[in-house]
Image (tube, rainbow, N blue to C red):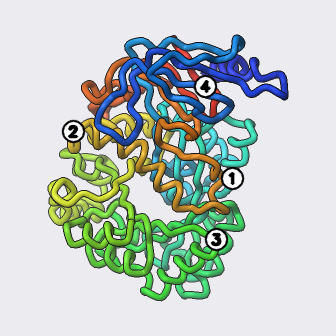
Amino acid sequence: MKSFILLTMMTSMAFASDDTKIGQIVFKNVDIFNGIENKLYEKYHVLVEGNIIKTISAEEINARSDAIVIDGTGKTLTPGFIENHAHLMLMGPNLPAMEADKTWEDFAIHGARMAEMYLMQGFTTVRDAGGANGGLRRAIDAGEIVGPRYYPSGAFLSTRGGHADFANYSAPVGVETNFGRLNLSQEVDSVAEVKKYGRNNFRMGATQLKYMQSGGVVSAFDPWQLLAGSPEEIEAAVAVAESYGSYVMAHSYRKEAILSALDAGVMSIEHGFAFDCDIAEVMNEKGAFITTNLTAFDPGLLDIPAVKNVPSSLAKAKSATETFKNYIPNMKKCPVKRGFQTDCVGSVDACNIQIAYEKHLNNEFFGSYESLKTMTSVGGEISKLTGDFTNPYPKAKLGVIETGAYADILLLDGNPLKDFSVVGTGDKWFGAEKRPESPETIRIIMKDGVIYKNTL
């Protein structure tokens, strides 16, 4: 796959060897899902010039004689997918192992492999929800490694005993950790520490901040009901982010946590399992977003080894499942802007399977149109929350097919509004067979005007 990717990159750039001439690619006779509307524009033509969508037309486009022409008859052109909650650096197999015996090389190599995997699954943009600094993005944007556009959050910000306290069980208060040394996670227990480590995250290349407000299920010290951090500490994180023109995303489970985060100015609620119509009213008033890993509502959740084999995690999972059971009906009754989230920590192969399953569950719970919008235009709106001077890709829109948007484009075999499987779904999670490096039904993957896959 790597040699194939490099070949297609060189092919797509070859026509731009004349510095005075911006390369052109024309997609002919494609059906367009634009990321916004519940319809396809049939038999349209799209001109990409450089890294921008230049023209969209129902009539044939008069391109230059040296333009590359791709006939997409019978295929659907969509925006590149956007993952809003990933952890590209965290390879597992569990948090104690990463704390005890992983070096920066381990994390870096895993991150590079995850970046390529995500792009080959059709994700041209990924927001990393904690554990990665700016180095991976610099390597991708410089062409040193293959990957999506990348929005890292820097270190998780968490209180002692909170959801990002990854220190060994017997570690004394204040001891330096592996996660802290590498700025993957930082313990913050005062307004001053929130400000110091929040500012350091932006210094290290973060595009937004991630605050761990609630506890979790598969974690050592924290009940999921935890309300970590004072209102003043969360407000401090928001103030730091806003000084960089950016925002805070908060790991929030309980209703009280979600509402207090929104009241403090948090713009992106992560997980948000206790979501209800009261929360929806506040979110819509503030223009906030939510991203939720729907695998949390999988019927087989209690059979996952990391849950069923750990008594404390099993007990937490049972109480959480009962408490969060109304999320899906509440989201349908009182919808808000919801972004796609996978939240995988583990091997590249395992995350590949989980991504495909998360796509499948989105369609099962919310249908094809809402799922496609969640994977495209909503993610594009979330990317804009970083503001112009912190956003690494500020010049055009993401997540839409429209004139002037970035040329992040997929070409799919079939109509995803009628057959959602063409986006690369998988109907099994644990116990599923290893998935291919890229779904056969995703025929073309273009990011920033460069073709990384073409099997037409």
| Type of amino acid under label 4 | Tyr
Residue at mark 1 to residue at mark 3: CA–CA distance:
27 Å
Residue underneath mark 3: 244
Q: Are marks 1 and 3 in contact (CB under 8 Å)?
A: no
Question: Marks 4 and 3, Cα distance to the nearest angstrom?
Answer: 33 Å
User: For the residues carrying marks 1 and 3, which lies nearer the camera in this image?
Assistant: 3
Residue that carries the numbered disc 4 in the rendered image: 452
From the image, state whether disc 3 or disc 2 is nearer to you. 3
Q: Earlier in the sequence, mark 4 or mark 1?
A: 1
Local secondary structure at mark 2: helix
Residue 82 at x, y = what percent? 47, 43
Q: Which residue is mark 1?
A: 104
Which quadrant would residue 114 be assigned to in this image? top right
Residues at marks 2 and 4, CA–CA distance in whole angstroms: 30 Å
Read off the residue under disc 2.
364
At 68% across and 60% down in the image, what residue appears?
205
Q: Residues within 10 Å of mark 2 (few under 14, many from 20)?
A: few
- Please report the residue visible at 63 percent of the width from the left and 68 percent of the height from the top: 180
